[in-house]
Amino acid sequence: MKSHRLARVSEVVREVAASTILFELKDPRVKNVTVTRAEVSADLQHAKIYVSVMGTQAEQKLTMHGLKSAAGFVQTKVASRLTTRFVPHVTFVLDDGVKKSVEISRLIREEVQQAEADAAARAASSTPETDDSPVAAEGSATED
């Protein structure tokens, strides 16, 4: 199958899943979920929906259980939007990419702050304590 068609179907699956999870699911276990991407198999039989869940490990597990329970509902919504012969079987996969990128950003920010603090400390220790610089001596000679 053409790759651009797979990309279009994947995008439709992602959009439908995201809006369904955000606006139509009433399951209290499903919260703090972001649909990051969707992958559809070449024969349109299977769709993996990658989700990012913010929270602790226990909250992620609970949310994934809720999403597994709601997979049929999401699949029904996808079927109503797609006009293909087959409706892909929906499975949810936990995507750790967002959490990892947040952690990397935090580490970089801490490293930059530490480098700035070190540079400020070096600059403070290298400044002269007396005003015997040649610039100060020239300034007083020109005023006479």
Image (tube, rainbow, N blue to C red):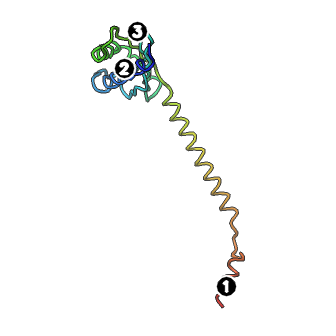
Residue with the mark numbered 3: 45
Look at label 2 and name its amino acid: Val
Earlier-in-chain disc, 1 versus 2: 2
Label 3 sits on a secondary structure element that is: loop
- Disc number lying in front (3 or 1): 3
Kindly identify which numbered label has been placed on residue 23: none
Earlier-in-chain disc, 2 versus 3: 2
State the quadrant of the C terminus.
bottom right
Residue depicted at 40% across the width and 20% down the height: 10
Instruction: State the separation of the CA atoms marked 1 and 2.
Output: 77 Å
Residue 25 is left or right of residue 14, and the answer is left
Residue with the mark numbered 1: 140
Label 1 sits on a secondary structure element that is: helix
Residue depicted at 33% across the width and 11% down the height: 84
Earlier-in-chain disc, 3 versus 1: 3
Look at label 3 and name its amino acid: Gln
- Disc number lying in front (1 or 2): 2
Residue with the mark numbered 2: 13
Residue 9 placed where, x, y %?
A: 38, 19
Depth order, front residue of 132/138 = 138
Residue 129 is left or right of residue 63, and the answer is right
Marks 2 & 3, CB-CB < 8 Å contact = no
Name the image quarter holding residue 127.
Answer: bottom right
Crowding at mark 2 (Cα within 10 Å: few <14, some 14-19, many 20+): many
Instruction: State the separation of the CA atoms marked 3 and 1.
Output: 86 Å
Question: On screen, 116 above or below 97?
Answer: below
